[in-house]
Image (cartoon, coloured by chain):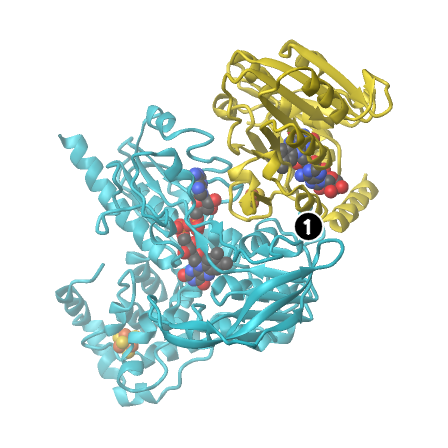
Chain colours: A cyan, B yellow
Amino acid sequence: MSLNPEYLKEERNQAWRAELRSKTKNKERTQIERVKMPELAPMIRVKYQDREVNMGLELDQALKEATRCMDCVNPTCIEGCPVSINIPKFIKYIEKGDILLAAATLKETNALPAVCGRVCPQEKQCESKCFYVDKLDKPSVAIGHLERFAADYERNSGAANIPEKASPNGIKVAAVGSGPASLAFAGDMVKYGYDVTVFEALHEIGGVLKYGIPEFRLPNSVVDFELENLRKMGVKFETNYIVGRTSSFEDLREEGYQGFFIASGAGLPRFMDIPGENSNGILSSNEYLTRVNLMGAAMDDKDTPVLKGKYVAVIGGGNTAMDSVRTALRLGASRAMIIYRRSEAEMPARIEEVKHAKEEGVEFMTLCNPLEYFADEKGRVSGMRLNRMGLGEPDSSGRRRPMPIEGSEFELDVDLVVVAVGVSPNPLVPSCLPDLKVTKWGTIVVDEDKMQSSISEMFAGGDIVRGGATVILAMGDGRRAAENMHNYLQSKSNN
Amino acid sequence: MNKIIEKTYFSDKVVKLVVENPLIAKSRKPGNFVILRIGEDGERFPLTIAGADPVRGTITLVVQIMGVSSSKLVALEPGDCITDLVGPLGKPTHIGKIGTVLAAGGGVGVAPLLPIVEAFKKAGNRVVTVIAARNKDLIILEDEIRKWSDEVIVMTDDGSNGRQGLVTAGMEEIIQREKIDECIVIGPAIMMKFASMLTKKYNIPTQASLNSIMVDGTGMCGACRVTVGGKTKFTCVDGPEFDAHQVNFDEMLMRLGGYLQEEKRATEIYLQKL
Ligand SMILES: Cc1cc2nc3c(=O)[nH]c(=O)nc-3n(C[C@H](O)[C@H](O)[C@H](O)COP(=O)(O)OP(=O)(O)OC[C@H]3O[C@@H](n4cnc5c(N)ncnc54)[C@H](O)[C@@H]3O)c2cc1C
Ligand SMILES: Cc1cc2nc3c(=O)[nH]c(=O)nc-3n(C[C@H](O)[C@H](O)[C@H](O)COP(=O)(O)OP(=O)(O)OC[C@H]3O[C@@H](n4cnc5c(N)ncnc54)[C@H](O)[C@@H]3O)c2cc1C
Ligand code: SF4
Ligand code: FES
């Protein structure tokens, strides 16, 4: 997706923006220091699984930060955004004080700005391309914080309006899974006038946003607000419904569904296949986070148990690993450790999460790799053996390949281990559809522009197409699939 | 949806429930299970679908009271609804015409065995079934099992129904008497372990239906992992039935005890509240 340069120019030339530009000189703008996100103090926040760490900008902070943005002639930040948000336009609306218009600008291309403002890896996307970073060697405009600010402002103002809808066309379409890809798809399809049902296997809607990402990073209320909006727009949700199991695709076709969007995610946890890994007290990050986030296991009145550890090792360096290790701290670990086989520079987690984890007291054991686990007489993990790693030549991912250092083995006492070394695509849907083309990794093959699969009325997007990716990419896929499924179904009904 | 239509006590610990869910009633196959959740504070837990009536749109569950979740389910009365019910899950049993099938069920494991016995019989096999429990009160579904078996042996630990002895004694008697082409065992892990050791001695292909601890039941968490043939498998999506001779039952028994402390505590709190 990219925005037409002519259109961007036209918008930039509007009188209100020209006026803002002339009001404050760029020299003054660049003198302002990047805003600091107000945060809950580490000592306090490690006691609460459900209190958000980032507290959000105040209005005056947001206005000041928005003033830093120079409304560049060539806004390179937009190139870094997977859904091409018109970044200077929304930021200038904030500077002008029209926060609701800023939120509306975000929603032109981003269905869930309050979510993305919190979880996008901005430092690798828009912010990495900002003029401040690129040319001035200064911290970028805090685009992510501003995005969150505008979206939260709109939500809290009560002014969030239900977008206009085309009149209903009576055509039924189904979305399989209820993660960000499906939610974005459903929002657009219902606007085009379709009768949309979202099917979810679990008892809660939201996919990873609910079962994976903890409340201290993404409060459920933020997600629920978006779900409520979709409901008001007419999207139907069916929980406890596994497409391909509860009913087959054939059954749904017979019920009149004409288009399918498959966004079943990359839910299958990987393990390392090393000795002792099936001991009690060693679990996948999916299991750990699902117990705590989806089932509320940390709360006394919930039936689902979760094992608590004093010495907790989390294997991996992504967002999932950070979420798990910080959860372990909040559940009372006295030592919470990240064990990652590469160095910190290669960690795929958002920089902010790494920073927060460190502030909270997480120990980072980088360039270490688990070899084996030991268990006590009851089968509960009691220790592990690791070795240290060095970095060799870059591998296929462009990151330097970790290599074991001979003779560097050592042991560590642990009583809980969370394995967060990645996920595989959910094989359920492909296994029900022999004609559906998949790659050797099990991801669904789609036409990249249209998100259409080898079965023409089936579109797919999100992690089931990309492997483990991001919320914003999943959402972008959902929107693209909606547009193209709409065109496809229209041209079919016109013939 | 998920309304309880009938409730029958087999004993004070074992209850049969007929539950309305037309979609699952239609799509389920022998060997499939469901995951349930009772109330907003409930945990997700698995139960085998013991039978289904697609015309009425109902499924049958047989549950033994173990701890909090099974107690909460049994506390529901006809007319009440189960908060969440999802399925059918797991791979269905592979049913074919193979000759003589020896089916062995222990305790509440007889419930999931019933639809499998029925399916093997309907597929034209000779079916001999051994059902076993600690005492006569815990023997369930005897008449239903008899309906679909050519012969039934009942075994109890105390001899209060049928013969005295363990399930394996009944099995061995049959194995020594006639040629068995396949064996199916469902019951407590420890029973399946010994039944599997027995049939291995006689080289009889054996399927065991494993009752690992589960959370989602869709392959997402790995709580249910077991080692089969030296490889880690997820019971909920790769099973629940596996080649019994390849299953590492000792590891499975160890993993079943993984939350013992937490379960005990939860049960105590639950009982206090009543
Ligand atoms: C712990 C964690 C932290 C993360 N942190 C970040 C972050 O900070 N920033 C970021 O950008 N990304 C992050 N990600 C990645 C991001 O969440 C995913 O890329 C994104 O959610 C993928 O969206 P999706 O719509 O493809 O699928 P998912 O969100 O995975 O949802 C798929 C849903 O489909 C359901 N389903 C599967 N099969 C069926 C079926 N047959 N019928 C019905 N339902 C079905 C599943 O139950 C699931 O709920 C994180 C992921 C995890 C696990
Ligand atoms: C695929 C599958 C099918 C099943 N089918 C049935 C069925 O048809 N009828 C039925 O009564 N039960 C069945 N079970 C077992 C049932 O899920 C558990 O008994 C139930 O979850 C116990 O929950 P609870 O909260 O009542 O007890 P808890 O408090 O969780 O446990 C109490 C006691 O039961 C033991 N226990 C816990 N989970 C299991 C388990 N999965 N298997 C064996 N023992 C366990 C614990 O170690 C503890 O001693 C099945 C399990 C699986 C995996
Ligand atoms: S590159 Fe930076 S300064 Fe320029 S428009 Fe984008 S956010 Fe503003
Ligand atoms: S129960 Fe979660 S993977 Fe099997």
Residue under pointer 1: A305
User: Relative to residue B15, is residue B183 drawn left or right?
Assistant: left
Residue that appears at 64% across and 75% down? A43
Q: Quadrant of residue A289?
A: bottom right
User: Relative to residue B6, is residue A202 drawn left or right?
Assistant: left
Is any part of residue B7 visible from this angle? no
Image spot of residue B242 (x, y percent): 57, 35
Image spot of residue B35 (x, y percent): 59, 35
Above or below — where is B160 with respect to A284? above
Per the image, label 1 sits on a secondary structure element best described as loop
Residue that appears at 48% across and 21% down? B26
Q: Quadrant of residue A323?
A: bottom right
Q: Count the marks.
A: 1
Is any part of residue B219 visible from this angle? yes
**Mark 1: is the Cβ under 8 angstroms from ligand 2?**
no
Disc 1 crowd rating (10 Å Cα; few below 14, some 14-19, many 20+) is: many
For the N terminus of chain B, give its image quadrant: top right
Q: Return the residue nearer the eye: A485 or A32.
A: A485
User: Relative to residue B22, is residue A447 drawn left or right?
Assistant: left
Give the chain letter at badge 1.
Answer: A
Image spot of residue B16 (x, y percent): 69, 22
Residue that appears at 61% across and 27% down? B204
Q: Name the amino acid, label 1.
A: Pro
For the C terminus of chain B, give its image quadrant: top right
Image spot of residue A12 (x, y percent): 19, 71
Q: Return the residue nearer the eye: A112 or A244.
A: A244
User: Relative to residue A132, is residue A295 drawn left or right?
Assistant: right
